[in-house]
Image (cartoon, helix red, strand yellow):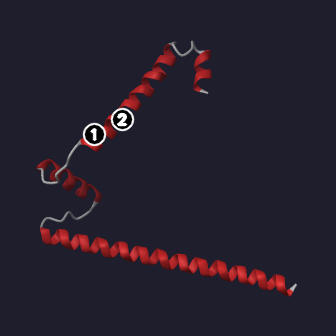
Amino acid sequence: IVLSMLAESGGIFGFKGLLHISIVIFILINVLFNYYKCLVVKNDHRSTQYRVAVRELALATGVQYPESEEEVETFRLNYEKMMKDRTNERRQQVKESVKRVQEKNDNMLDREDGD
């Protein structure tokens, strides 16, 4: 679609074509560079830059950042409990929906048998 539109305005080597190609190449290089940096950069979680960035992120999102080892352990335990509770809730919801579907199917079969 883009190539046919570019053909009308001077082709791929016209101003619009080169501009389009430049933008696509810029975005592609940007994505690949950022992906590479995410894979290569080692973060030891002990640097002051990391801690400052995490605190700023916690402040911006309203999360209480744990300061001591005890707070970290409490946060971890609370997080694990929350995840277990969510998993159990979802399992219960699935069981209830399966039960409703089975009841609906049984009702449909009963109606067919009654006719």
Q: Amino acid at mark 1?
A: Lys
Q: Amino acid at mark 2?
A: Leu
At which x and y percent is residue 35? 33, 40
The numbered dot on residue 16 is none
| Relative height, residue 18 to residue 71 (above, below) | above
At which x and y percent is residue 100? 63, 80
Image quadrant where residue 9 sits: top right
| Relative height, residue 100 to residue 68 (above, below) | below
- Image quarter where the N terminus lies is top right
Look at mark 1 in the image and give the residue it sits on: 37
Give the tally of numbered discs: 2
Residue at (54, 75) in percent of width and height: 94
Left or right of residue 1: residue 24: left
How dense is the environment of label 2, judged by Cα within 10 Å: few (below 14), some, or many (20 and up)? few
Residue at (29, 71) in percent of width and height: 79
At which x and y percent is residue 33? 32, 34
Q: Nearer the viewer, residue 113 or 65?
A: 113
Residue at (83, 82) in percent of width and height: 112
Look at mark 2 in the image and give the residue it sits on: 32
Residue at (14, 72) in percent of width and height: 70
- Image quarter where the C terminus lies is bottom right
Labels 1 and 2: the sequence-earlier one: 2
Helix, strand or loop for disc 1 = helix
How dense is the environment of label 1, judged by Cα within 10 Å: few (below 14), some, or many (20 and up)? few
Mark 1 vs mark 2, CA separation in Å: 9 Å
Left or right of residue 77: residue 84: right
Left or right of residue 42: residue 95: right
